[in-house]
Image (cartoon, rainbow, N blue to C red):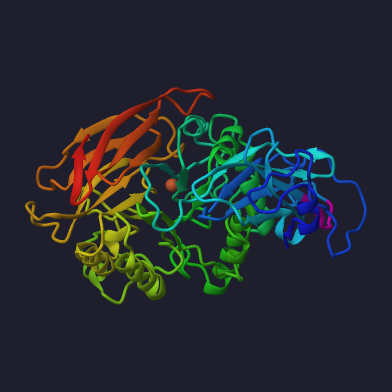
Amino acid sequence: MNTPLDRRRFLALGGGTAAAALTASHWASASTDTPVHSGPVPDGVFRLGVASGDPLPDRVVLWTRLAPQPLALDGLGGMPDRRVPVQWQVSRDESFTQVVRAGATMADPADAHSVHVDVAGLEPARWYYYRFRSGSELSPVGRTRTAPAPGAAVNRLNFAFASCQNYPAGYYTAHANLAREDLDVAFHLGDYIYEGGGQGKLGRGHVPNHEIRSLADYRVRHAQYRTDDNLQAVHAAFPWVVTWDDHEVENNWAGDDSDPDSPVEEFLARRARAFKAYWEHMPIRANRAPQGPHMTLYRGFTFGALATFSVLDTRQYRSDQVACKQADCADAFDPARTMLGDEQESWLFARLRESRTRWNVLAQQVPLFEDPNVGQPSDKWEGYRASRARLLDVFAEERVGNPVVLTGDVHKNFAADLKLDWDDPAAPAVGSEFVGTSISSGGDGTSVTRYDPDPANPHIKFENSGDRGYVRLSMSDVELRADYRVVDTVERPESGVRTLASFKVEAGTPGIRRG
Ligand SMILES: [Fe+2]
């Protein structure tokens, strides 16, 4: 759908290569081969901000959705029922005097007037600025960064991960602070929206005020979250790689199973609506748009010779949760039950074994480490012990360099070693897991922090509850450092942030160390 910049005009403007800058005023022609019904574009179409994501060495996805009335309950955002042209520019500088790519696309009502521009021909490991235009209106400016070239030496990669941003539960003070961090890329591990109708106590009640089920409902809910200035700021600050957990569809869904169970066809229809709205609102490539109730969200990213990231989907292909309340019940060990599904598991294991990067990072949803102090862990990897054992066996293979797992979901911070034998306190670590607390879910709590909380389970190095925030990481060839960043409050619009705890993993030595 994107119209590449007309090459003759490009050359006439003084560029012979993709690196040559266009003039400041250059916008690609908005005309396309598809007729557009005439009519004015409403004012205020960029009220949902801009975003970028899924960075590759030569390209990145640019996103916006035209929605002058984001909360319109029909889910159409106040847009007319026709396609509307949107132009875009990518520049080396914030004032757009060095535009290197420009083009035009169509915002289609079939996709809620969202656009997913896959801008190619960019240089690796480089910052760019981007913006959109519709009619006479300009979008806010976003900043994004391409990944380093394959195999390239990378001195340092700065990134962060976040999860669980229940809108009524708190202001996005964590996002406000995250937006100010010096990062190359950020990861969202799910619970980007919540599906319930909760109103909270902060004047940030969910719209609509009931559990979302229709496509219009899911669109309005995503749009409501995206009206938040802090969420817009964090998307505009750097590229994001996103994956979902359960609340993007429904609490604790698993594969084809809803919770509580509803007829499969009914649930799959709902899942299709939720997936569509999710894709419409995320900076994900257009070719990953869902086909009915199926959307391939697991995917990989490589940052030079330094890191391979595997972004997982632990919801869509998993077996239903075990019914028993104890994770050590026989069902939890059933090798026929799966967390990833056969295809994703094969993809992941091959990717880990073939990777030649220093670090191998899994960006995923639910805790992997054994936590014997949790009453009902059946939603986590503990409820899928055969799947977990297979994964940890791969981690233990010598050729898989420095496996690290990033996790969300539980609204608590943890740091833990990953082991083949959880019952042997002396068993060596084969990997490391960082679990990050929520952005806002749970609201302000009573902060409780414990180091080495359980002598019988020395693999658990750190546990913190009651705080909200995100985890910031800095990676080099030598070590991976993680700073647990927590805000003072999510129940007031402004908050400071501080580092609650720091840990590191030394390359070549699996396991978490105080740092
Ligand atoms: Fe959550």
Residue at 79%, 39% (x, y): give it.
25
Residue 153 in view in this figure: yes
Q: Is residue 28 above or below residue 472?
A: below
User: Where does the magenta region start and end?
Assistant: 80-86
Please state, as top left, top right, bottom left or bottom right, where the N terminus lies in the image: bottom right
- Residue 83 is inside the magenta segment: yes
**Nearer to us in this view, 15 or 149:** 15
- Residue 430 is inside the magenta segment: no
**Nearer to us in this view, 486 or 431:** 431
Q: Is residue 288 left or right of residue 106?
A: left
Residue 319 in view in this figure: no
Q: Is residue 140 above or below residue 258?
A: above
Q: Is residue 450 left or right of residue 492?
A: left
Where residue 126 sits: x, y (%)?
Answer: 52, 44
Please state, as top left, top right, bottom left or bottom right, where the C terminus lies in the image: top left
Where residue 200 sits: x, y (%)?
Answer: 53, 35
Q: Is residue 483 left or right of residue 10?
A: left
Residue at 58%, 61% (x, y): give it.
275
Residue at 73%, 44% (x, y): give it.
22
Where residue 154 sits: x, y (%)?
Answer: 38, 47
Q: Is residue 484 left or right of residue 27?
A: left
| Quarter of the view holding residue 403 | bottom left
**Nearer to us in this view, 461 or 412:** 461
Total numbered badges shown on the rendered structure: 0
Where residue 399 sits: x, y (%)?
Answer: 23, 65
